[in-house]
Image (spheres, rainbow, N blue to C red):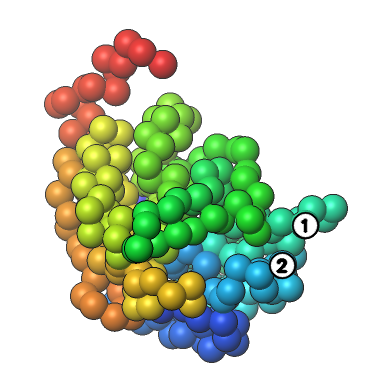
Amino acid sequence: MDRFLAAVVQMSSGPGRDSNLERARALVREAADRGARLVVLPEVFAWRGPRAEEAAHAESIPGPSTEAMAAVARETGAFLLMGSILERAAGRERSFNTSCLLSPAGELLARYRKIHLFDVDIPGRVTVRESDARAPGSDVVVVPTSIGTLGLSVCYDLRFPELYRRQVRAGAQLLLVPSAFTFTTGAAHWEVLCRARAIENQCYLLAANQTGTSPHGFADFGRSLIADPWGAVVASAADGEGIALAEIDLEHLARIRRELPCLTHVRLA
């Protein structure tokens, strides 16, 4: 399929799993009703609360969140990226921050455990130590599907271009980036990082973000977007919860790679 609609979903998730899942289901249905064949949810869309409570709310895969979203994938017939959920890991005190890709039949096609953890202290604005409660993953995940080859990542990964170059070497055409970018870092870097990763890898990039005030007390940036392989922002979300849709045109991607073949000119690995 060379052309199809894709959607990024913007949410303001909190500590109520049931309400978060119900809101996610409604937004996925809205995107599918508007024609989306691929829907991307934001990071930690199903549960987002105090860091000290994360271990108690981590879940297995498959588990309650994957089962709930598999049902809506089957209902809508869309590929569904479950942003990320906190995955309980046997024998570990810390959970993984895990993104799951579901098929239109509700099958688990792939899972990606966030590699780069957000440990940042910007005095007076935002302090986060993700590694206090979460363990890093290690695997680069690229998934061939009937709508294109998808590269999976999460939020802070966006600052590490080597991850996306490895995905492109494995065939990625669409880069999926569920996120919970803070307002402080997002206002400075969100769009430019998204566009840069799209441009340098000649890929579509779909970035679904959290919005509003996080349970950790700082503002999330929102501004979920889709960028094309030329770096143009072809869809962006308004303030608050909602969706943004754009057409994915793989022939447009192929033409850009053919006319400006920089991926074939790489000299440094």
Element assignment for label 2: helix
Would you place residue 134 above or below residue 44 in this image? above
Q: Position of residue 23 (x, y in %)?
A: 46, 85
> The disc labelled 2 sits on which kind of residue?
Ala
> The disc labelled 1 sits on which kind of residue?
Glu
Furthest toward the top, the residue is 267
Q: Residues within 10 Å of mark 1 (few under 14, many from 20)?
A: few
Element assignment for label 1: loop
Q: Position of residue 269 (x, y in %)?
A: 41, 16
Would you place residue 97 above or below residue 137 in this image? below
Residue located beneath label 2 in the image: 55
| Marks 2,1: beta carbons within 8 A | yes
Distance in Å between CA atoms under marks 2 and 1: 7 Å
Res. 178 visible in picture: no
Specify whether 177 is left or right of 51: left
Considering only order in the chain, which callout, 1 or 2, is on the residue closer to the N terminus?
2
Q: Residue at x 79, y 53 (%)?
A: 92
Specify whether 212 is left or right of 48: left
Q: Residue at x 39, y 71 (%)?
A: 218
Residue located beneath label 1 in the image: 93
